[in-house]
Amino acid sequence: MRGSIFIKIFFGFWLVTIAILGSWQLAVQYFDSMSFTGVEHRPGDGSPQRRVLRLIWALENSPANALPKLIADGRDKHGVEIWMLDESGQDLLQRSVPPDAAELAQRLQRGRRRAFKLTGEHYLAAHAIVRPDQRRWRVVMALPPPPHRVLGVLGANPWLRLILAMVISGLACWALSRLMTNRLRELQQASRLLAEGDLGARIKVRSRGGDETDELARDFNTMADQLEARIQAQRQLLRDVSHELRSPLARMRVALALAMDAPEKRTDYLSRLDQETERLEELISQLLSSQQSDLTLDKHIDLVALLQQLCADASFEGKADNKRVTLQATLDQAVVASSADLLLKSFENLIRNALHHTPVGTSVAVHLTLDGDHYRVDIEDAGPGVPDEELQRIFDEFYRVDTARSREEGGYGLGLAITRRAIEQHRGQVQASNTGHGLRLTVKLPRPN
């Protein structure tokens, strides 16, 4: 769960919320204590601000004869100088009042109950009180100043503290959100580049590990790789088709020109023209078959009976060259879903291909076995095999191991491509491997449930 983006989001915003609440609480406690720095704090007395508030309450409600002692205790025990001024500005104890304290007390005459002022030496706080005898007094206290003017302003204004907390939490959440969405922005940019035709657009990501965004980036890179491979294959197919069509069309043009120039041989040239037309039609038919994508598996075929028939037909054809095709099946019946005679053509193509490449006097071995949830068919010849680096390419359109072979001998290179597509449309797979004494083509088809 450590690499999960859900855990990151959950704990991230949870920690941010805790940090905001905790910083707010700490700030409140800090400013409460900062405003009265230097005041003696004894266990059980409460916070300094609360002691001062209790002192103001005592000055407002205590008997008149107890006021001098309260003022003296504030100075001696808490280090807070206190002046109680009547409406005329005279101190209760007939002391001289500093100008700053007198000016701050004047502010309370305009209906204000509290006033604050920061001087170079003190932090002055004034509070209006009403004694039980209905006389109005103004209490001015001189407190030690805060360590910094900005902190003093923040301590005196809770709205500024709220705005500061909002700004700090906003910056923290912005940075956290940006950190979590960077990968999505990279994915968006790469997707746009890919949509604009840049097939090399990729996202830089570690090969393994990470959270869901890393998995998404790797999946995108895999998709882009497959898309690039498919588009390159389509482009190559287009080039190959153009090349393959050019030759018969050129021969048809030559035959037509010769037929027009030599009327006495027109029949021969028209026959050649008809032959090239048939080859062109065959090529187009095979090409369309290799690109067919829609398929409905609407019938069932027994592979045992199918392979027996194909092996018998191939053996009959190979008698002229002393070639044989043998079948070894460990099953009495192997029924699979198919579409029309597509599987018949696929296996016929594989067996004929093996028969064509096996040397004279040798045989092709066909094996049918049950491999887990799949039927497995192995077709082995005794031919020269295929270079290892070309084993997968033999299933590509227009690919030939021997590029020097003519169309008449080697075909168009579409047979195995058609077979692979047909097998894959049956939810199977086909692969080639060298056995050391020939080539093995392996087909796996899913067994119906």
Image: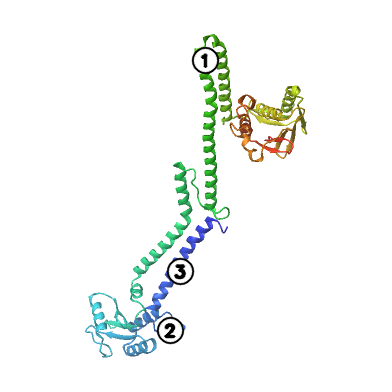
Disc marking residue 41: 2
The quadrant in which the C terminus is found is top right
| Residue placed most toward the observer, 281 or 154 | 281
Distance of label 2 from label 1 (alpha carbons): 120 Å
> What's the image's color scheme?
rainbow
- Binning the other alpha carbons within 10 Å of mark 1 as few (below 14), some (14 to 19) or many (20 upward) gives some
In this rendering, the answer to whether 166 lies above or below 248 is below
- Outermost residue, top side: 264
The image quarter containing residue 319 is: top right
**Tag 3: amino acid:** Gly
Q: Secondary structure at mark 1?
A: helix
Residue that mark 1 sits on: 258
Name the residue: 45% across, 45% down: 193
The image quarter containing residue 51 is: bottom left
In this rendering, the answer to whether 380 lies above or below 67 is above
Of the numbered discs 3 and 1, the one sitting upstream in the chain is: 3
| Residue placed most toward the observer, 252 or 429 | 252
Name the residue: 44% across, 83% down: 45
Q: Secondary structure at mark 2?
A: loop
Pointer 3 with pointer 1, Cβ within 8 A: no
- Binning the other alpha carbons within 10 Å of mark 2 as few (below 14), some (14 to 19) or many (20 upward) gives some
**Tag 1: amino acid:** Leu
Disc marking residue 22: 3
Q: Position of residue 195 (x, y in %)?
A: 45, 42
In this rendering, the answer to whether 357 lies above or below 42 is above
The quadrant in which the N terminus is found is bottom right
Disc marking residue 181: none
- Binning the other alpha carbons within 10 Å of mark 3 as few (below 14), some (14 to 19) or many (20 upward) gives few
Q: Is residue 45 left or right of residue 152?
A: right
**Residue 219 in sight in this render:** yes
